[in-house]
Amino acid sequence: MKNFVKKSTKKIQVICKKANMENKIGEQIHEIRRKKKISQRKLSKLTGAAQDYICKVERGNASPSYEFVEKILKALGAELIIKED
């Protein structure tokens, strides 16, 4: 199963395989943020994180905690679904 962003009627769902979640989550956060036309600056204000940290997460240069990923996705109106391999 390939990682993808699925649009539902309630929320956007970020679906990741457990094995490669860390590698793809940043790309998916970036994709959702761009589609919703939210700047990194605004997302940093919504999450309380520094803008440069948001940038690192999106590029895959940071390993955010699960809780922080949930905080980002909540700010974007999305939810994380982890699939077992």
Image: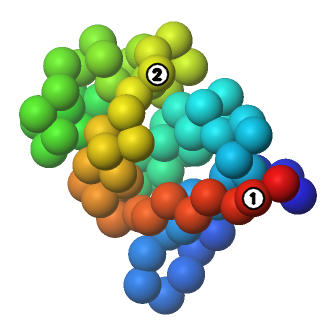
Q: Looking at the image, which residue is at 17% across and 40% down?
A: 47
* Element assignment for label 1: loop
- Could you tell me residue 49's position as x and y percent? 18, 27
For disc 2, the neighbor class at 10 Å (few under 14, some 14 to 19, many from 20) is: some
**Of residues 25 and 65, which is closer to you in this image?**
65
- Circles 1 and 2: CB distance less than 8 Å? no
> Do we see residue 4 in this rendering?
no
Which mark's residue is nearer the viewer, 1 or 2?
1
Q: Of the residues shown, which amino acid type is indicated by label 2? A: Ser
Image position, residue 5 (x, y; %): 64, 59
Q: Residue furthest bottom?
A: 9
The answer to which quarter of the image holds residue 67 is: top left
Q: Which residue is mark 1?
A: 84
Dot 2 corresponds to which residue? 63
* Residue type, numbered disc 1: Glu
Say left or right for 80 vs 53: right
Is there any visible trace of residue 81 in the rendered image?
yes
Q: Quarter of the image containing the N terminus?
A: bottom right
